[in-house]
Amino acid sequence: MSTKEKILEKASELFAQYGYQETSIRKIAKEAKANSAMISYYFGSKKALYESVLSTNMDEFLESVSRIKAKDEKEFLKKFIKIHIGVLKKRGKYISYLMLKESATNFEQVKSLKDKYFDPLANIITRVFKTGIEKKIFKPYNEQIMLQLLIGINVMLALKNPQNSIEELSNIAFDVFMRGICA
């Protein structure tokens, strides 16, 4: 593992455990067994490091979701869930905890990532919910609440069941979610 990868890994862990404010560059460097200057060299600042940690895999995730081809809203959600759980399992628990924390606090530390990644993803999914509601496939719930529930189910399954396959967890998440929203 390169020094940069070690820094990202330890930063993920420490930011998830202690939060942005309570995590120092010095502590990250110590845990990564790297010089503090290396963090500045690779990332420039603590905020840039934090953004780098959070944006890991987000370009690929957004692109994958944007390319989903589906015959209907249910099929779209099934494919989205599989992609999302796959990314969550790939990224690991610390990144997932950070994403949840940021979304719960309305992305206070990383407004630029919210605009670049999270808002476009939310718009895609809420459009699917809205269309499904209009077609009477889904119950008429608030689309934002539906999105939060979907993300929550995926995150909890991916984090709490690392021994299960992506396919298995995706099927469970889809089944649980659809039982709650289908008309």
Image (cartoon, rainbow, N blue to C red):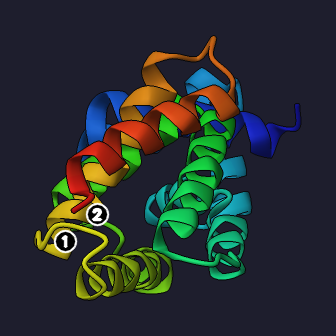
Q: Which amino acid does label 2 sit on?
A: Leu
Q: Residue at x 49, y 84 (%)?
A: 116
Can the viewer see residue 45 in this picture? no
Q: Which amino acid does label 1 sit on?
A: Gln
Label 2: which residue? 147
Q: Residue at x 62, y 72 (%)?
A: 65
Residue 139: image location, x then y, percent = 16, 67
**Is the residue 174 above or below the residue 57 in the image?**
above
Residue 138: image location, x then y, percent = 26, 68
Residue 92 in which image quadrant: top right
Residue 82: image location, x then y, percent = 62, 48
Farthest residue, direction left? 141
**Is the residue 83 above or below the residue 112 in the image?**
above
- Of residues 139 and 164, the one drawn nearer to the viewer in this rendering: 139
Label 1: which residue? 144
Q: Residues within 10 Å of mark 2 (few under 14, many from 20)?
A: some
Q: Residue at x 58, y 24 (%)?
A: 30
Classify residue 159 as left or right of residue 181: right
- Of residues 63 and 13, the one drawn nearer to the viewer in this rendering: 63
Q: Do the residues labelled 2 and 1 touch (CB within 8 Å)?
A: yes
Farthest residue, direction top? 163
